[in-house]
């Protein structure tokens, strides 16, 4: 028993070092083991109090089936965004309700265990972040609320349905952000499932209250009025509904008079794509955002058959590098301009496992730049345990951004022979000097994990972007894919319409700068949201210094 509690203590210390669970699928698997321990403890507790705690026993049996299924393949299970959201919701909200139910009991074994572990559970930010991720996936991949609620996502193994409470929770999160478009979608889905007879602790009146207000905020007075009338049939004494009924009727009459006065202008608001309107009112650069989402769905790729015929596969030996002469590397052209190449079988399963093992305990949420202003992600690469940090251009302080949902860690060559071997392999294949490159960055994407469009290099208006490193600009990017992704997760180049899909054991490489030293603006790229699965990548940013004789400068600006 003492050994068991010692192991639990060490495990909890590991969890205590982490936050923002929803931003890393890899770390969220730890939560499944935590929840499994809680279920086991809870079942022991029930055996002692079976007659008195029948309600708790039913709870445990329901969760036991979930955790048993999850343990078959934890990463794949939590890679399903609905499962990840429900895990955040259970540990943040529902276990607290259970704790309140059994607190008065005389047997304190389970209670003390639960109380100790609850301080390391996901918090409100995690639950809210997972909910926002589901909404982001809904938009990017054009999924209906009903499709997500039914768990009908591509590539899923553990199909998971959403309850009325789950849909209602997503609607509330959108409502708290004044996002009435998504409030409507999820409240309407909750109402649909209630109308179909699903049992729920959430009543129709509450759902209709949110739904009618969200629709009113989007200017659809007639629909808001209809829903308010339905609400009053269920609860004639509802004070807010009675007040809204009179208000909506007055406003609707004014609207009809105004429309009658302007006969020549016909404007059917229901024909307007509400999300497009919402995006236009936001600060998002709409054209790039649309291109980004289209590429993530596999649409709008600008590669004609004629251009594709000029792409080739080949074996390369790094200009007769001795380490590659007998074992050349398989290289394939992914894109012509910018020239993006993929290397196959470039990292082994053993090396991937070791890199993940080294990185996982130190994964941290990255604080990064705004992709609109283009302020760069920078790192003091001589520090082995650090976060990728940038400054908010408005406040001058480090900030965590919602447009990158992932956690990252940095590995130095001297930490393990595998890291050193990987660095040497990149140098052998590219012919570039790794002594001035940044450390190997390992990233694990979370629920709906993404990184919106950005540049890897510093532009002319950022002369001090990498001044602290003293190694010049980022001349090239090398990106390892360390996992397959069931759906989503592509690397897309928004300016040229290119999309590169993850494939475990491969790596892609491109130059961020021309030989003249000018930045190649066609390399603006993004990591698409992970729809289903677990995405692990590692990358190496290679700098200018040390490449003077390996990639000589040219006189042509865009050679």
Image (cartoon, rainbow, N blue to C red):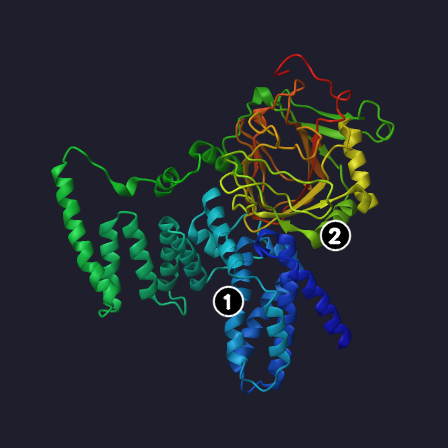
Q: Which residue is mark 1?
A: 93
**Image spot of residue 489 (x, y percent):** 58, 42
**Image spot of residue 432 (x, y percent):** 76, 27
Q: Residue at x 35, y 50 (%)?
A: 180
Residue 141 in view in this figure: no
Name of the residue lying farthest toward the top: 555
Q: Residue at x 68, y 23 (%)?
A: 312
Quarter holding residue 345: top right
Residue 435 in view in this figure: yes
Frontmost residue, 78 versus 238: 238
Q: Which image quadrant: the N terminus?
A: bottom right
* Crowd class of label 2 (few under 14; some 14 to 19; many from 20; radius 10 Å): few
Secondary structure of residue under mark 1: helix
Q: Which residue is mark 2?
A: 357
The residues bearing labels 1 and 2 have C-alpha atoms spaced at a distance of 31 Å
Frontmost residue, 2 versus 314: 2
In this rendering, the answer to whether 428 lies above or below 10 is above
* Crowd class of label 1 (few under 14; some 14 to 19; many from 20; radius 10 Å): some
Q: Left or right: where does residue 83 sit relative to residue 548? A: left
Frontmost residue, 339 versus 542: 542
Q: Earlier in the sequence, mark 1 or mark 2?
A: 1
Secondary structure of residue under mark 2: helix
């Amino acid at each position: 028993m003492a050994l068991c509690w010692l192991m639990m203590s060490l495990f909890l210390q590991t969890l205590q070092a982490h936050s923002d669970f929803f931003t890393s699928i890899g770390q969220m698997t730890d939560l499944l083991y935590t929840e499994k321990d809680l279920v086991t403890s809870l079942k022991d507790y029930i055996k002692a109090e079976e007659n008195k705690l029948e309600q708790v026993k039913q709870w445990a049996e329901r969760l036991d089936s979930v955790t048993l299924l999850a343990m078959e393949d934890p990463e794949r299970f939590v890679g399903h965004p609905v499962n990840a959201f429900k895990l955040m919701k259970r540990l943040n909200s529902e276990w607290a309700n259970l704790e309140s139910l059994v607190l008065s009991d005389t047997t304190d074994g389970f209670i003390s265990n639960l109380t100790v572990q609850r301080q390391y559970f996901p918090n409100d930010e995690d639950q809210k972040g997972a909910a926002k991720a589901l909404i982001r996936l809904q938009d990017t991949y054009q999924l209906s609320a009903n499709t997500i609620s039914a768990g009908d996502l591509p590539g899923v193994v553990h199909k998971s349905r959403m309850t009325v409470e789950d849909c209602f929770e997503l609607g509330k999160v959108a409502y708290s952000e004044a996002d009435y478009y998504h409030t409507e979608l999820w409240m309407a889905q909750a109402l649909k499932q209630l109308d179909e007879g699903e049992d729920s602790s959430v009543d129709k009146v509450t759902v209709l209250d949110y739904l009618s207000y969200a629709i009113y905020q989007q200017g659809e007075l007639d629909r808001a009025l209809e829903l308010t009338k339905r609400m009053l049939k269920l609860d004639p004494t509802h004070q807010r509904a009675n007040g809204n009924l009179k208000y909506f009727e007055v406003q609707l009459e004014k609207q009809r008079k105004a429309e009658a006065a302007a006969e020549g202008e016909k404007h059917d608001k229901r024909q307007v794509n509400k999300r497009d309107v919402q995006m236009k009112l936001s600060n998002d650069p709409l054209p790039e955002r649309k291109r980004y989402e289209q590429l993530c769905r596999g649409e709008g790729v600008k590669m004609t058959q004629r251009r594709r015929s000029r792409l080739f596969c080949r074996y390369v030996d790094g200009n007769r590098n001795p380490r590659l002469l007998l074992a050349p590397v398989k290289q394939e052209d992914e894109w012509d301009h910018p020239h993006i190449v993929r290397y196959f079988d470039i990292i082994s399963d053993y090396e991937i496992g070791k890199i993940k093992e080294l990185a996982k305990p130190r994964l941290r949420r990255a604080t990064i730049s705004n992709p609109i202003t283009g302020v760069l992600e920078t790192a003091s690469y001589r520090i082995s345990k650090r976060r990728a940090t940038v400054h908010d251009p408005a406040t001058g302080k480090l900030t965590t951004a919602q447009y990158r949902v992932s956690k990252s860690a940095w590995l130095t060559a001297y930490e393990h022979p595998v890291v050193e071997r990987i660095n040497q392999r990149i140098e052998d294949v590219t012919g570039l000097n790794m002594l001035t490159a940044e450390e190997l960055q390992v990233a694990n994407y979370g629920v709906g994990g993404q990184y919106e469009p950005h540049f890897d290099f510093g532009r002319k208006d950022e002369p001090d972007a990498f001044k602290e490193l003293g190694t010049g600009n980022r001349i090239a990017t090398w990106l390892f894919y360390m996992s397959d992704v069931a759906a989503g997760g592509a690397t897309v180049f928004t300016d040229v319409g290119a999309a590169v899909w993850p494939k475990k054991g491969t790596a892609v490489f491109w130059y961020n700068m021309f030989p003249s030293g000018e930045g190649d603006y066609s390399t603006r790229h993004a990591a698409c949201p992970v729809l289903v699965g677990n995405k692990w990548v590692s990358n190496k940013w290679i700098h200018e210094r040390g490449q003077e004789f390996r990639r000589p400068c040219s006189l042509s600006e865009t050679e």
